[in-house]
Image (spheres, grey):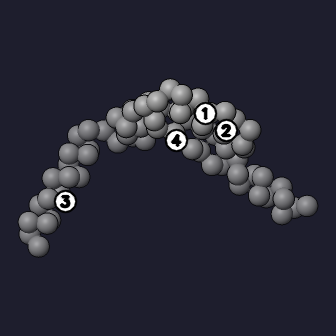
Amino acid sequence: MELVNDQQQQQKHFHVLVVDDSVIDRKLLERLLRDSSCKATFLDSGDKALKYLGLQDDELENLSSTSSESLQEN
């Protein structure tokens, strides 16, 4: 019995980020995930998803320029 309760508590900690530009697909996934015990957030663009995750455009540019610099050094 304790194992089942532990699994149910762990499942509640899942958070699903659904990103799709199609309203129909987002609604379908919302219906499919509604009965699950996980939390779901639905967004319609990758830019909004990056902002939601706390990644700003400036940070992404810094990451890509750093990667380019290290590739050039190698």
Query: Given the image, on which type of amino acid does mark 2 rest?
Result: Leu
Q: Which mark is residue 17?
A: 4
Q: Is 57 on the left or on the right of 14, as rendered?
A: left
How many numbered marks have been drawn onto this rendered protein structure?
Answer: 4
Q: Position of residue 19 (x, y in %)?
A: 46, 38
Q: Residue at coordinates 59% horizontally, 45% vertically from top-left?
A: 15
- For the N terminus, give its image quadrant: bottom right
Q: Earlier in the sequence, mark 3 or mark 2?
A: 2
Q: In the picture, residue 20 is in which quadrant?
A: top left
Mark 3 lies on a secondary structure that is: helix
Q: Earlier in the sequence, mark 2 or mark 4?
A: 4
Q: Earlier in the sequence, mark 4 or mark 3?
A: 4
Q: Give me the C-alpha separation between circle 2 and circle 1.
A: 6 Å
Can I make out residue 52 in this image? no
Residue contact between numbered discs 3 and 1, judged by CB atoms under 8 Å:
no
Residue that mark 2 sits on: 32
Residue that mark 1 sits on: 28
- For the C terminus, give its image quadrant: bottom left
Query: Given the image, on which type of amino acid does mark 1 rest?
Result: Leu
Q: Is 15 on the left or on the right of 6, as rendered?
A: left
Q: Is 56 on the left or on the right of 33, as rendered?
A: left
Q: Position of residue 68 (x, y in %)?
A: 14, 59
Question: Callout 4 environment at 10 Å: few (<14), some (14 to 19), or many (20+)?
Answer: some
Instruction: Give the mark toward the camera: 2 or 4.
Output: 2
Instruction: Give the mark toward the camera: 4 or 3.
Output: 4
Q: Give me the C-alpha separation between circle 4 and circle 3.
A: 26 Å
Q: Which mark is residue 49?
A: none
Instruction: Give the mark toward the camera: 3 or 2.
Output: 2
Q: Give me the C-alpha separation between circle 3 and circle 2.
A: 39 Å
Residue that mark 3 sits on: 67
Q: Residue furthest top?
A: 23
